[in-house]
Image: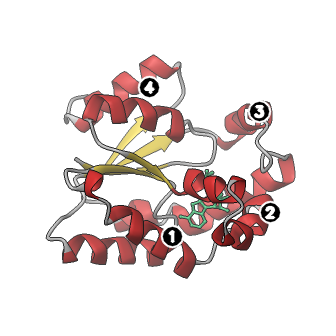
Amino acid sequence: MRLVLVGPPGAGKGTQADRLRDSLGVPHISTGDLFRAHISQQTELGREVQEYLDSGELVPDAVTNEMVRERLSQPDTANGFLLDGFPRNVAQANVLGEILANAGQKLDAVLEFQIDENVVVERLLARGRTDDKEDVIRHRQQLYRTETSPLLDYYSDVVVSIDAVGDVDEVSARALRALRGEK
Ligand code: AMP
């Protein structure tokens, strides 16, 4: 299954992606995790992107798209993947469409996590990642609204939405039901 997860920062995409990976048997590809790994390994890419992550800005598309292109060329993605945090804007979605079309593939679904922004601010402050400061969180939320949420229209034929409020098991069960086309 080829799946994209969309939802505001703090909606629980990463946690659910780990679970869905186990249920669906496809790799979980998080662009945020890939960038953070580069930063902690102090690679050249890591140095290049650090400021963007610290300030909650989007890393430039050219850099992000190349990293994703490379990741999706790895053999473990042949039977599917779960993309978490990519695409984050329509330009990235066009690039993803092109990568998939070149491989004769297409997305099966875009899973939308619906959650109130104010609920997630508290959750993110508690998580305490270096980019989880209130002003940076608000900025990431704003970028979600302006840059990322238009993807819900872009992908309207394949969007499946779930209520992301609830405990982890409950939300996982909802996600699997929704992906099976059940209520
Ligand atoms: P995340 O772990 O998805 O919350 O991403 C953390 C940070 O990584 C974001 O605030 C951006 O700085 C950067 N990032 C992750 N994915 C992307 C993407 N698709 N495009 C641009 N920047 C990204």
Amino acid marked by disc 1: Asn
- For disc 2, the marked residue is 55
Q: Amino acid at mark 3?
A: Glu
Which residue has dot 4 on it? 171
Q: Nearer the viewer, mark 2 or mark 4?
A: 2
Query: Gap in Å between the C-alphas at discs 2 and 3?
Result: 19 Å
Q: Name the residue at 64% across, 71% down.
A: 45
> Which amino acid, by three-letter code, is at mark 4?
Val
Is 151 above or below relative to 32? below
Between 126 and 163, the one lying in front of the other is 126
Quarter holding the C terminus? top left
149 lies above or below 165: below
Q: Are marks 1 and 4 in contact (CB under 8 Å)?
A: no
Query: What is the secondary structure assignment of the residue under circle 3?
Result: helix
Picture quadrant of residue 49: bottom right
Residue 177 falls left or right of residue 137: left
Q: Which residue is mark 1?
A: 89
Mark 2: is the Cβ under 8 angstroms from ligand 1?
yes
Tag 4 secondary structure = helix
Is residue 8 placed above or below 19 in the rendered structure?
below
What percent of the width, then of the height, locates residue 112? 42, 46
Label number found at residue 122: 3
Residue 99, x across and y down, in percent: 29, 74
> Does label 2 or label 1 sit earlier along the sequence?
2
